[in-house]
Image: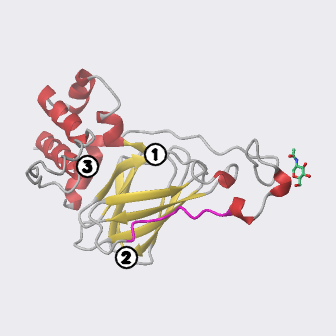
Amino acid sequence: MAPASLITLLVILSVAFVAHASDPDILTDFVVPPGTNASVLDGAFFTYTGLIADNSANPAKFTVSKATAAEFPALLGQSVSYAALVFGPGTVNPPHVHPRASELLYVVQGPLLVGLVDETKNELYAQTLQTGDMFVFPKGMVHFQFNGGEHVARAFSAFGSASPGTVSLPVTLFESGIPDAVLEKSLHVDEATVHALEHDLAPPAPAPAPDSPPAPKNGAASPVPACLSLLVGFAASLLL
Ligand SMILES: *[C@@H]1O[C@H](CO)[C@@H](O)[C@H](O)[C@H]1NC(C)=O
């Protein structure tokens, strides 16, 4: 997808999110979960081994794995967490917001296009990051990452909260149960287009039984880019 299309999409989709949430200040050095005997803690409590990014040579999809308080309880009250992001060729981490944390993204395998929307001016700040580059997404601002290249891209993100939260704009708009009429009026599209977007984001059908004939190949690598293309299509048509 061309950056210009992404800009158009973001201009149409941008929502003024206001974020004031933050992690509580704890009155102890760290928080021991209820039921844990603090006097028998060892190094394992402060260790997490689950941040397994997709290490396959040619990943096709976008995947994110997280080390937040949910996965790693020792982070409770520490105001930090991590994510590992792997972008197959042509994949996107769709426009989203972290309501409780700024994000500091470090590219270990570029290039990777990133962008954020300044909600006060509705202005896009985008950058193509190379390996070794770092980019900050301020707390509560709409942002995305997109690998438009033909090779895998990888990045790690640090967050200023043990529970940053994620509000995905496509998922929030089309999978939360917002009435179709609201979406039609808000996006200036007809009912069929809203249904197409909702259907496009719906979870994929279960895999066919081994002996059934293979399903026809769908051109889209993942449902999200297809949805974004459709959105860009009608967003562009509005502007023409
Ligand atoms: C916690 O562990 C210590 C050391 O093993 C033990 O002496 C103590 O009784 C334990 N406390 C509880 C509430 O189990």
Query: How far apart are labels 3 and 1 at the CA level?
Result: 16 Å
* 51 in magenta: yes
Tell me if 166 is positioned left or right of 48 in this view.
Answer: left
Q: Residue beneath label 3, please?
A: 224
Q: Is residue 14 visible?
A: no
Q: Residue beneath label 2, please?
A: 130
Hey, what amino acid is under mark 1?
Thr
Query: How far apart are labels 2 and 1 at the CA level?
Result: 25 Å
Hey, what amino acid is under mark 3?
Val
* 49 in magenta: yes
Q: Position of residue 52 (x, y in %)?
A: 47, 65
- The prevailing secondary structure element of the residues shown in magenta is loop
Frontmost residue, 177 versus 136:
177
Q: Residue beneath label 1, please?
A: 166
Q: Position of residue 18 (x, y in %)?
A: 50, 38
Question: Which range of residues does the magenta coloring cover?
Answer: 47-55
